[in-house]
Image: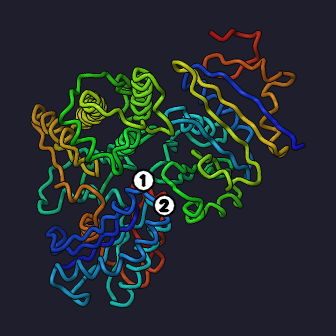
Amino acid sequence: MLTLGIETSCDETSAAVLADGHDVLANIISSQHSIHAAYGGVVPELACRSHTQNIRPVVEAALVQADVTLRDIDLIGVTQGPGLVGALLIGLSFAKSLAYGLGKPLVGVHHLDGHVSAIYLGDESVPCPFVALVVSGGHSDLYYCPQRGRYDVLGRTRDDAAGECFDKVAKMLSLGYPGGPVVNRLAEHGNPAAIHFPRAMQRRNNLDFSFSGVKAAVRSYLLDVSDLHGQRIFQDDSFWPLPDSPQWEQDRNDILASFQEAVVDALVSKTIRAVEQTKAEAIAVVGGVACNTVLRRRMALAGESLGLPVLFPPPILCTDNAAMIAAAAAFRYEACRELYQYPAFLDLDACPNLGISETVSVST
Amino acid sequence: MPTTLEQHWHTSCAEETKAVGVYLGSQARGGDVITCCGPLGAGKTTLVQGFAEGLGISSAAYVRSPTFTLVNEYQGSVPLYHFDFYRLTSPDDVWDLGFEEYVESEGVVIVEWADKFPSLFSASPLQVRIEIAPSERRTVRCTSHDTTYARYFNPPVEGLRQDEMVFFCGRLMRSGGPTNP
């Protein structure tokens, strides 16, 4: 069975072709970071416009790379939500038209179900139950998964997502967008114990996260540093102009390493607490922040000490991509084929606030 | 000379900033447009969390930063549309989100980082600005030139002047009652 996946919920226009629900034949991601970098963030006006421009060439590139034609596709999967409604609608409308024109079934996929499904790509033997940490620019959630495709919410962020904090801290230091990779890279040269930034909610006996405190602590630390330099150079939430000295570079790397340490500490300790409370048999870490090398290393060590496998998708399948959407779609389709046929899928609508426990199916 | 409504509160922790939000939310009605400004980490999202509570939105709704998502929607006595312009670069981006439709809806619109595009708010919204004072202290300042928003400026306790309102245990109280530590 060949599945075509389409994802347009935020920055990326992506299309993928999957064989048998787990074998990635093609996964094209039209990274729009070069467009967005100039603006220090995702620009939805540009994102929507580029989705419109990108979607057809991206789908065609995926078909070419997989060496198949549209006629060979058996199933289409598309992100239904959550996300920006304008961006979601482009992918959804395109997918609906394809499914209608080709007479193929269509599955609407929850974006986070997609992220977790990335762990099944290439390897379908994931022990259940498992705890999933979904950590990205828009999410920092913990789920208990008693079986594949079922999600019980254990905890969420109370304020900012972890990835958002990486972006904001990078912007404070004029390091560009997205912030995750550059902070990760520079932090390697810094001392993670140089500054103690707060780990919020560690003592509370729940599984929620809070990251706005560490963000504010970094800002306030930078204000103090700018005072030390004899002038207020922290303006408009950016530290500018940057001091030009090798010592500053070391200071900055120490700040970044210490900030990253605080975030990783919170993510790992709450995930471990979730595992202990639920007696889960594995840990899955997915989403863009799952690319962070320190998080990967620390979570793998924590899993090792508990004797549990820790699963990370390869980095290319951590950030938004369509292969994960196709994987989730193929799994749901196999579970209940009749739900996803014409004309039921014509009722699929983009849901910017789609909840993961809501049934991701079309009405029949 | 347009009417100027003004009031402010000094808060000493996040809980107190949230309590101001609860009070403001309890005064909100469908159609209100509120801008919420202040530096990173000032407590804008904290204030909106209180605002949502005051509007009757369940704490299970997890009011979170909309920086990445750009707009979050919550269902209270009326819908609450929580925007964040932090990542946007021009008023065109805002229109692209369908902002106009939200403003003309039955819901309450509250916008973080609204000062990036002041021209979008010609109809004089309720302006909330959070200033960072030393340590955890904040000043929450509300202003409006539109008498539609006068109810936000009424004291929460009858006969109480603004400068008599103090915090105790995270709640707005009449001064002369339990004293503010």
**Nearer the observer, A51 or A157:** A51
Task: Using a 10 Å C-alpha cutoff, classify the residue at mark 2 as few (fewer than 14 neighbours), some (14 to 19) or many (20 or more).
Answer: many
Query: Could you tell whether A213 is left or right of B169 in the image?
Result: left
Judge from the rendering whether residue A166 lies leftward or rightward of residue B125; answer left or right: left
Q: Is residue B122 above or below residue A310?
A: below
The image quadrant where one finds the C terminus of chain A is bottom left
- Report if residue A269 is visible in the image: no
The location of residue A172, given as percent across then percent down, is 41, 39
- The chain letter under disc 1 is A
Question: Residue at left 75%, top 37%?
Answer: B143
Residue B133: image location, x then y, percent: 57, 22
Q: Is residue B19 left or right of residue A208?
A: right
Q: Which residue is label 1 attached to? A: A41
Q: Which mark is residue A352?
A: 2
Q: How many marks are shown on the rendered structure?
A: 2
Neighbours of disc 1 within 10 Å: few (<14), some (14-19), many (20+) = many
Q: Regarding mark 1 in the picture, which secondary structure is present there?
A: loop
- The image shows residue B116 at horizontal and vertical percentages of 59, 49
Nearest to N terminus: mark 1 or mark 2: 1
Which secondary structure lies at badge 2? loop
Q: Position of residue B153 (x, y in %)?
A: 80, 33
Q: Nearer the viewer, mark 1 or mark 2?
A: 1
Determine the chain carrying the residue at label 2: A
Find the distance from the CA under tag 1 to the CA under tag 2. Answer: 19 Å
**Callout 2 amino acid:** Pro
The quadrant of the rendering that contains the N terminus of chain A is bottom left
The image quadrant of residue A253 is: top left
